Amino acid sequence: MHDTETAEKHSDQHKWRPTACILCSINCGLEMQVDQGRIVKVRGDKLAPNSEGYICQKAAKLDHYQNHSARLRQPLKRQPNGEYAPVSWDAAIAEITARMRDIKAQHGGGAFAYYGGGGQGNHLGGSYSGALRAALDTPYLYTALAQEKTGDFWVNGKLFGRESCFVLEGMEHSDYCIVLGANPYMAHGVRKTRDLLKAYKKDPNRTLVVVDPRVSETAKDADIHLRVRPGMDAYLLAAIIAVIFQEALEDTEFLRQHTNGYDELRRHFIDLPVEQYATIAGVDPELARQVARGFATAKSATVRADLGIQHSLHSTLNSYLEKLLFLVTGNFNKQGGNHLMAQFAPLIGHSKTDDKKTAVTGMYGIAKLFPPNILPQEIDSDHPDRIRALVVDSANPALSAADTKAYRKAFDKLELMVVIDVAMTETARHAHYILPADSQFEKVESTYFTFGFPTNYYHLRRPTLPRSGDTLPEPEIYRRLLVGLGAIPDRFPLLERAAKLDRRLPVSRAFPLALAAALKRHPQWRKYVPVILYATLGKALPEGMQSAAAIWGVCQMYAAKFGSQVRRTGLHGKGYTLGLALFNRFLESPRPAPIATFKVEETWNLIKTRDRKINLYIPELTEWLDRLQTEALSEDRDYPFILAAGERRAYNANQIYRGPEWRKTDKEGLLRIHPSDLAKLGLVSGDKVRCRSRRGAVEAIASADESVLPGVLTLPHGFGMLYQDDQGRQLRNGPAINLLTDAQHCDPIAKTPYHKYVPVALEAVDV
Ligand SMILES: Nc1nc2c(c(=O)[nH]1)N[C@H]1C(S)=C(S)[C@@H](COP(=O)(O)OP(=O)(O)OC[C@H]3O[C@@H](n4cnc5c(=O)[nH]c(N)nc54)[C@H](O)[C@@H]3O)O[C@H]1N2
Ligand SMILES: Nc1nc2c(c(=O)[nH]1)N[C@H]1C(S)=C(S)[C@@H](COP(=O)(O)OP(=O)(O)OC[C@H]3O[C@@H](n4cnc5c(=O)[nH]c(N)nc54)[C@H](O)[C@@H]3O)O[C@H]1N2
Ligand code: SF4
Ligand SMILES: [Mo]
């Protein structure tokens, strides 16, 4: 008996459990071994169809996410002396919702803002959080996406008709790829990135161009490296597009057939001074010409852009020019070009011009998102309609948003602040209530980063570990808040019964019929459908899978729109039956499973303009382009260096790991500086320096690095968290870089921060 038990325990310990990595948007399939609440071993899952066993160096350390001294294990309430004391879930929910009802009654829904809703590995909770915003009656959703990609989405809205039109790069199938302000070797962003970069390197018929001021790990192995001056990409891109028009290399047939505004657009480039613009950008004009020709004449060409252009000067203009590059050369919606993509569950929406704007700064939403750069101003104001209550879920804006000082000050003005997280973060330390969530390995989870093409996959991950405290999954937290607000009842007896019937008889339609009837009787419930699904259908799902209920709705909507693409993956039926089959597939598969297979020509159906043509000409942006000619770049003598604040490196991963123990190298988050600059300061590698901007200062260890240009500095993203060491001392995990950044230093259209272009001064720190 005893022996069998040990043997069972032994085999259980050595069981490999399929899951996924939660550290970046690729979500590589993993297998892990667990023992007594610990993640003991991690390996790439060879059977995961979208990552095929690939992982990078960061995934092996996931136990540092699961187990650390700052994990939250019970709800906490701030006491008058500023300390936190445990509180029961019932009391916390009752008190929070009573405060919310008061604030709503006095000031209306516009007094509430919501921040976050999901990180690199967890989007399921976000599916339910919309119901809370609906119950509070606020449109104000602030997310990290609106501090990086909303300029890009705004451009998509103009070009393709909706901000939710999502463009992917075809890097895997392309002959010519421009990596523009991205460092995929470190940051990934494409499946099996390093294998793909190797494939480009090995194949003499494929060209990889990297546009980056730094000799990044990706640039090192590129065929061509355009070492642009920081913030000058708009000049470089304008010059490259000008060469294409001036040498008549554009795809006129594509342009006539698929676009409007070609002639107006061409006018802005045909006389553009290529030499001058390339020189301003710091790039040899001949090299710029060579890339223009190479890109325009390649069989297929694609652009992969990221923060290097989005977090830098001219951000929204850069996104426009980047897209023009693949559009004017006809590298769109074709194999190996950039193309539209049908998202499984929409990560973003489309903001209309008459949607509600913010009270204090008058900012409009883009893709239904509001930019973190304005939030402190929206709170810290005398405006009667200011933000008075904030819910933060899965984000740490006290460190990750621009202008840490402004954030801290604004947080302390809130009448109610609630943080939902797995860890005691810098943001949580300002909250009135902290609600602890199950970790991503203790609950069903998934992301909507379903970017595979032609076949995309969805991974509904099973829990691999038991719950380790008095924590709850986010859907349950949102359900309780909704009940507390009086938005929904605690039980739905009829729907619960119908759901059980349907789960037993997969062909029955008891549940959708009952749901439709309930919504007809209670139209106010329509806003809360995901939470109602959780509370009803969820209970009929297999043990532990309740939170997957919203995916039933997602599958229904997807199958209704993309039936033939779903059927191509081997499922049958249509309408409700097909949606249910898709849902059952995800419920049954512990690994990523196909959603749909697209033919590249079908991506044309995803354009949302009335005439299904691309609107090439965006006057706001061509005017901005014209202004480049006379734009003077003022150099600030007091702040002579340009700091790229937030580099992706081998050992950083947003705010997901808190302590430094997981890092093999770069434990301090080194400041990279050109050797000549370091020598000029009379310093050597390893010396401590103070980096100072107009907003604040951080200290860091300097490291002489030939990969950065003289006059340029870099600091990593994902440091600066507080943690306890073995002796219980509270320490800071490297530089908190957003002490340096200024919320006003941002894109005029999207309010996205210019994190890669922070003017700073540097001085030695006497130790
Ligand atoms: N290891 C690791 N990987 C991550 C993350 C992480 O924290 N750690 N975070 C994930 C997230 S949330 C994101 S959004 C992605 C971001 O991924 P990336 O955008 O690829 O990463 P970054 O290192 O921020 O910036 C990319 C490159 O921009 C360059 N750059 C700086 N200034 C300029 C400029 O003015 N012009 C140009 N052309 N380039 C410039 C930098 O030198 C850098 O090589 O990474 C994801 N992957
Ligand atoms: N200066 C500068 N600032 C930057 C950047 C930069 O390059 N430079 N990069 C920016 C970018 S691109 C991004 S995406 C943001 C990222 O910054 P954030 O938006 O703050 O997101 P994450 O760092 O992913 O933080 C995730 C939070 O979710 C928590 N968490 C983890 N798992 C769970 C869970 O299951 N449930 C809940 N409720 N919480 C969980 C973690 O503890 C952590 O607090 O930072 C931005 N900030
Ligand atoms: S960090 Fe990204 S690339 Fe690395 S293992 Fe995790 S998901 Fe894969
Ligand atoms: Mo990001």
Image: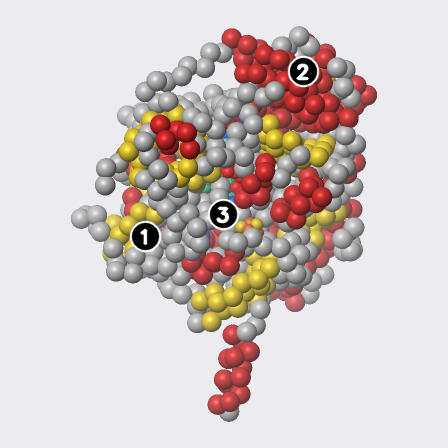
Q: Does residue 47 appear to the left or right of 599 in the view shown?
A: left
Q: Are marks 1 and 3 in contact (CB under 8 Å)?
A: no
| Front residue (pair 358, 678) | 678
Sequence order check: which comes first, mark 2 or mark 3? 2
- The residue lying toward the viewer, choosing from 294 and 249, is 294
Mark 2 touching mark 1, by CB under 8 A? Answer: no
**Residue type, numbered disc 3:** Ala
Q: Mark yes or no: residue 533 visible.
A: no
| Horizontal side, residue 526 vs residue 692: left or right | right
Q: Where is residue 232 in the image (x, y as percent from the top left)?
A: 53, 21
> Is disc 1's CB within 8 Å of ligand 2?
no
Whether residue 597 can be seen here = yes
Q: Disc 1 or 3, which lies upstream in sequence? A: 3
The amino acid marked with disc number 1 is Tyr
Q: Give the secondary structure at mark 3.
A: loop
User: Where residue 746 appears, x then y in whole percent?
Assistant: 44, 25
Mark nearer the viewer, 1 or 3: 3
Ligand 1 within 8 angstroms of badge 3 C-beta: yes
Q: Is mark 2 on a helix, strand or loop?
A: helix
Per the image, the residue denoted by label 3 is: 650
- Kindly state the secondary structure of the residue where label 1 is placed: strand
Task: Identify the residue shown where x is 37% and y is 59%.
Answer: 68
Say which mark, if any, is on residue 723. Answer: 1
Residue farthest left in this picture? 81
Within the image, what quadrant is residue 710 found in? Answer: top left
